[in-house]
Image (cartoon, rainbow, N blue to C red):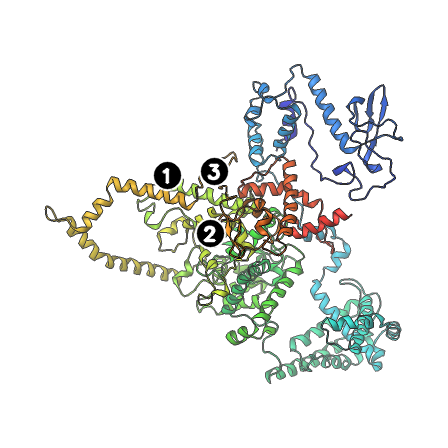
């Protein structure tokens, strides 16, 4: 890609001179050097004598640069800058030396001097682009409305902003077109900041980390905990001290006899006040054990590392295997119940983990221990058969009905947690993966595979070293246009609509941002909350105890669906590969050829009915014609169809730009097909979201509550997006629509037979039902000179030119009334696309409140929104057009005084939004009174740096803070802290 700056300077060197890039750093309020302050955030000393000789403001000492004066000429050697002393605005010759100029003023003086030099060097002094248009017509083309008396420095600034993209994508595109510069992100790889997880792995790729990664952290933690308990068991029994290292026994004895319980005793009262149920002696015992385990853990060292000291004397242990068996049989649940045989086997594996001492046990010890373990597992299994515990291991698999029930409850929550849990739940089941893998999904690895979303896993439990390429094959995920409770694309689209920063950083960031372990833990907390709220219904309706349900229940649910969904289900090998199970090296190699079986698994896990022709249903797509207008039937010419399809595609792309931002989708184009299907799926289920949970109990609300923050996004506030629903189509193999979709995959033969039989049945039924009507039409046409029938008279009148013209006029008038006078106009984006213009509803949409008789811009049911920052900025500038709520920037205090803290919230929210507006305007993109969602997104991305100036980039846990997901109230809190500092 050619250097933009070099081409720009070469083109304008003889007229406008070289341009300096305007500083884009942040504003600092205390130091006079402002955003160029080197001690950002530190207060100034009241006794300081450092003042800028140009602006006269107080500055930090390191924030200025010294200069030399000789015969009225100022020289700054470090910058290679010389200028007249008269250019200084507020010189103070009597001020103590050394004299300084702040960095901000040096930058300003350097630009001013460069402008003077350029004007002196140009024999033809040009002060406006009109005069230069003969030589450089691109200047006039870029700014055709610029006044003739525009100052030279303003022209330079406007051109520089156009080059940098700070004047919006339209001017940037024009500038690139005039100078023949391509900015296609597909041709040039754009470097983005990696996600926190990836950056951590890059920074910690060293010898120590490699050693620690020999085992998964979860595996090491399990073994470490069980070994600590075994060593603690040996220490607590004085007769077993001979099996421990004497040095370790001495150290643990010192800790045990010198325990300081003062902190526990001091916190006991607060503990009881907060609902704690343990007595003080019990908490003291817990504290003592905690201290002992900490020292044991220190002796065992970190994962993959050699222990710091010997703990267990293996030679003594080999002589008496009953010591370890006695420890195993002492391990029970709190209610004295026996553990599962699988759990006891885990204790045996943990003992093997102690081989890090470089000790190899004898064959006799291994055989004797193996024999005893067989007895332990047999005894535990027999107890299980007599009613001890559950038959299943770990979490109980969900039934498909219970899986749909949970997805329904997540949707009814409506908040950020519910939207996250819904997408996490459907991804886990559709991929048949562990919750850990769901949290690991990276957006850039998701691709559109014709009729499904393909998601691979680069790392999973069954392929931790990446040695099996078969496990990296993508898993295909399908849409379910019939059942929104199982539809993955719509849930993914909702989650990304609430978190558009996922698209902005999609090249490196994971789909679910944050630490890897936190994602499954967050889903578990939300699941626990739902289980506790609906505990009785889950037990009585589905027969489940909530203690049996966990995150792993979702993966087991997927496997149950794959294996028991139908006698004509996928092969067992395909189900194993889908779920990440090992089936043998040679089998893995040959079964990879059965690619179609994974697509079959994908359709099953999407919840499509496998015993119906609806299993072959296509994904939702935007098709602009009906079946009866099919191209092959001669109803619509190919050219007309292509024109209609392009119009619909432009509207769909405009809708996606409104939600996610045109800049983001331009950089990350490969996600567009997935978002397109997600939007179509959302519109396909729109009636379900707006329907009541129970028509007989309207107080329960809608499936997607009115209070959901998703309803404050363009998905529901922009009526243009809702009108796209009329173009959403789904198709069957026997349907005329099917030719407009990508070829279907994953269809077994019996489903195709179902489908074609259904199509033949429909054609026969339509044919028989149409025979009487056809006979009547034939008889009517054969009337000859006889009396005309009523149908003939009706058709003659309806097809007459007068009524046809009146019908067209009425249709256009109705359309105008429904749109409240909103007409389509050019969006000023430089392209041919059109947007839905927004009316001035500043005063029109007022609601009279019955409580006090006042008229306000919002109804009495309106609640002050608490949205992520980017979504809130959209709502602030665009409002809710579908519900006739004007943009919040027009609100007055009287409009929200009926809400608790309404006036205060409006004032604080305005401060945050104004900060973003000012920063965006400073970068060349000025907010307008009436804005589209696309324009609002552009302003936000330009002005987000104003929030970064006051919000720390790191959390208290040293995690990277995602600014766009903050609430405005959080930003206000940081503003107060910044002002206080």
Q: Position of residue 43 (x, y in %)?
A: 81, 43
The image quadrant of residue 82 is top right
- Looking at the image, tell me whether mark 1 or mark 3 is earlier in sequence order: 1
* Mark 2 residue crowding within 10 angstroms, few (<14) / some (14–19) / many (20+): many
The image quadrant of residue 890 is top right
The image quadrant of residue 637 is top left
Q: Position of residue 361 (x, y in %)?
A: 77, 73
Q: Which label was assigned to residue 639?
A: 1
Which residue bears the numbered disc 3?
A: 833
- Please state which of the two labelled residues, at mark 3 or mark 2, is closer to the viewer: 3
Total marks placed: 3
Which residue bears the numbered disc 2?
A: 680
Tell me the element at label 3: loop
Q: Position of residue 177 (x, y in %)?
A: 55, 30
- Please state which of the two labelled residues, at mark 1 or mark 2, is closer to the viewer: 2
Residue extending furthest left? 785
- Looking at the image, tell me whether mark 1 or mark 2 is earlier in sequence order: 1
Q: Is residue 258 above or below residue 335?
A: above
Q: Is residue 883 above or below residue 74?
A: below
Q: Would you say residue 493 is visible in this rendering?
A: no
Tell me the element at label 1: helix
Q: CA distance from mark 1 to mark 3?
A: 19 Å
Tell me the element at label 2: helix
Q: Would you say residue 431 is visible in this rendering?
A: yes
Relative placement, left or right, of 499 versus 258 is left
- Please state which of the two labelled residues, at mark 1 or mark 3, is closer to the viewer: 3
* Mark 3 residue crowding within 10 angstroms, few (<14) / some (14–19) / many (20+): some
In the rendered image, the quadrant that contains the N terminus is top right
Q: CA distance from mark 3 to mark 2?
A: 20 Å
- The answer to whether the residues at label 1 and label 3 have Cβ atoms under 8 Å apart is no
């Amino acid at each position: 890609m050619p250097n933009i700056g070099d081409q720009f300077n070469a083109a304008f060197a003889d007229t406008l001179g070289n341009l300096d890039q305007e500083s884009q750093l942040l504003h600092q309020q205390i130091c006079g050097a402002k955003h160029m302050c080197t001690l950002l955030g530190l207060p100034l000393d009241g006794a300081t004598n450092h003042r800028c000789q140009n602006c006269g403001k107080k500055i930090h000492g390191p924030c200025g640069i010294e200069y030399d004066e000789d015969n009225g000429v100022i020289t700054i050697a470090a910058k290679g800058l010389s200028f007249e002393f008269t250019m200084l605005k507020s010189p103070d010759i009597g001020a103590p030396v050394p004299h300084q100029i702040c960095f901000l003023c040096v930058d300003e003086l350097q630009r001013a001097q460069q402008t003077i030099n350029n004007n002196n060097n140009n024999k033809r002094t040009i002060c406006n682009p009109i005069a230069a248009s003969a030589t450089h017509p691109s200047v006039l083309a870029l700014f055709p409305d610029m006044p003739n008396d525009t100052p030279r420095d303003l022209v330079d600034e406007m051109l520089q902003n156009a080059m940098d993209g700070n004047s919006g994508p339209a001017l940037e595109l024009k500038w690139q077109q005039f100078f023949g510069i391509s900015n296609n992100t597909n041709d040039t790889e754009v470097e983005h900041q990696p996600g926190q997880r990836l950056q951590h792995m890059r920074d910690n790729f060293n010898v120590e980390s490699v050693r620690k990664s020999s085992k998964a952290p979860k595996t090491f933690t399990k073994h470490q905990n069980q070994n600590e308990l075994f060593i603690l068991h040996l220490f607590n029994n004085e007769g077993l001290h001979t099996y421990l290292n004497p040095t370790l026994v001495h150290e643990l004895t010192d800790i045990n006899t010198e325990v300081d319980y003062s902190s526990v005793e001091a916190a006991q009262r607060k503990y009881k006040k907060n609902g704690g149920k343990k007595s003080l002696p019990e908490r003291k015992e817990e504290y003592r054990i905690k201290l002992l385990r900490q020292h044991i853990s220190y002796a065992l060292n970190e994962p993959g590392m050699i222990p710091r000291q010997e703990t267990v004397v293996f030679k003594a242990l080999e002589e008496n295997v009953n010591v370890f068996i006695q420890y195993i049989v002492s391990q029970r649940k709190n209610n004295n119940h026996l553990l599962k045989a699988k759990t006891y086997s885990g204790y045996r594996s943990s003992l093997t983990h102690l081989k890090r001492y470089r000790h190899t046990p004898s064959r006799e010890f291994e055989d004797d221990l193996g024999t005893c373990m067989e007895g332990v597992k047999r005894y535990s299994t027999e107890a299980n058969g007599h009613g001890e515990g559950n038959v299943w291991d770990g979490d109980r698999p969900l039934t498909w009905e219970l899986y749909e029930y949970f997805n329904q409850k997540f949707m009814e929550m409506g908040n950020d947690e519910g939207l996250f849990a819904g997408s996490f739940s459907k991804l886990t089941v559709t991929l048949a993966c562990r919750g850990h893998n769901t949290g690991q999904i990276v957006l850039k690895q998701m691709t559109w595979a014709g009729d499904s979303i393909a998601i691979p896993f680069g790392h999973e439990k069954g392929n931790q070293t990446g040695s099996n390429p078969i496990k990296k094959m993508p898993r295909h995920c399908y849409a379910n246009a019939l059942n929104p409770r199982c539809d993955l694309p719509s849930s993914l689209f909702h989650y990304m609509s609430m978190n558009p920063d996922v698209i902005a950083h999609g090249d490196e960031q994971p789909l679910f941002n944050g630490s890897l372990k936190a994602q499954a833990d967050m889903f578990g907390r939300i699941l626990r909350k739902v289980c506790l709220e609906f505990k009785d219904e889950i037990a009585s309706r589905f027969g489940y105890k909530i203690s049996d349900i966990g995150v792993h229940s979702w993966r087991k649910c997927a496997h149950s669906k794959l294996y028991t969904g139908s006698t004509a289900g996928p092969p067992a090998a395909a189900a194993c590969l889908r779920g990440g199970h090992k089936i043998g090296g040679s089998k893995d190699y040959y079964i990879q050829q059965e690619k179609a079986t994974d697509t079959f698994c994908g359709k099953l896990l999407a919840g499509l009915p496998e015993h119906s022709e609806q299993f072959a249903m296509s994904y939702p797509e935007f098709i602009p014609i009906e079946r009866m207008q099919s191209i092959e039937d001669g109803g619509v010419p190919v050219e007309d169809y292509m024109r209609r399809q392009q119009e619909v595609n432009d509207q769909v792309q405009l809708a996606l730009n409104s939600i996610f931002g045109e800049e983001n989708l331009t950089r990350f184009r490969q996600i567009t097909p997935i978002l397109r299907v997600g939007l179509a799926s959302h519109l396909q289920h729109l009636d379900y979201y707006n329907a009541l949970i129970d028509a007989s109990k309207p107080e329960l609300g809608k499936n997607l509550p009115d209070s959901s923050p998703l309803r404050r996004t363009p998905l529901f506030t922009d009526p243009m997006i809702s009108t796209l629903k009329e173009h959403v189509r789904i198709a069957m193999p026997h349907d005329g629509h099917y030719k407009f979709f990508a070829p279907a995959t994953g269809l077994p033969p019996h489903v195709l037979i179902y489908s074609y039989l259904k199509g033949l049945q429909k054609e026969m039924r339509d044919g028989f039902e149409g025979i009487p009507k056809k006979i009547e039409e034939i008889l009517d046409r054969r009337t000859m000179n006889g009396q005309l029938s009523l149908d003939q008279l009706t058709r003659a009148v309806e097809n007459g030119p007068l009524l046809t013209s009146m019908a067209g006029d009425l249709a256009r008038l109705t359309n105008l009334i429904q749109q409240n006078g909103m007409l389509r106009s050019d969006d000023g984006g430089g392209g041919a696309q059109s947007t839905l213009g927004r009316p001035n509803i500043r005063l029109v949409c007022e609601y009279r409140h019955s409580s006090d008789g006042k008229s306000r811009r919002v109804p009495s049911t309106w609640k002050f929104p608490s949205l992520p920052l980017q979504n809130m900025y959209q709502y602030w500038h665009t409002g809710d057009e579908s519900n006739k709520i004007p943009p919040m920037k027009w609100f007055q205090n009287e409009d929200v005084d009926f809400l608790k803290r309404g006036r205060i919230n409006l004032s604080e929210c305005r401060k945050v939004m104004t900060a973003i507006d000012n920063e965006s305007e400073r970068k060349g993109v000025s907010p307008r009174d009436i804005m589209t969602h696309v324009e609002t997104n552009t302003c936000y991305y330009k002005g987000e740096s104003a929030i970064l100036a006051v919000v720390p980039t790191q959390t208290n846990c040293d995690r990277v803070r995602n600014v766009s997901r903050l609430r405005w109230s959080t930003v206000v809190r940081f503003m107060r802290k910044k002002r206080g500092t």
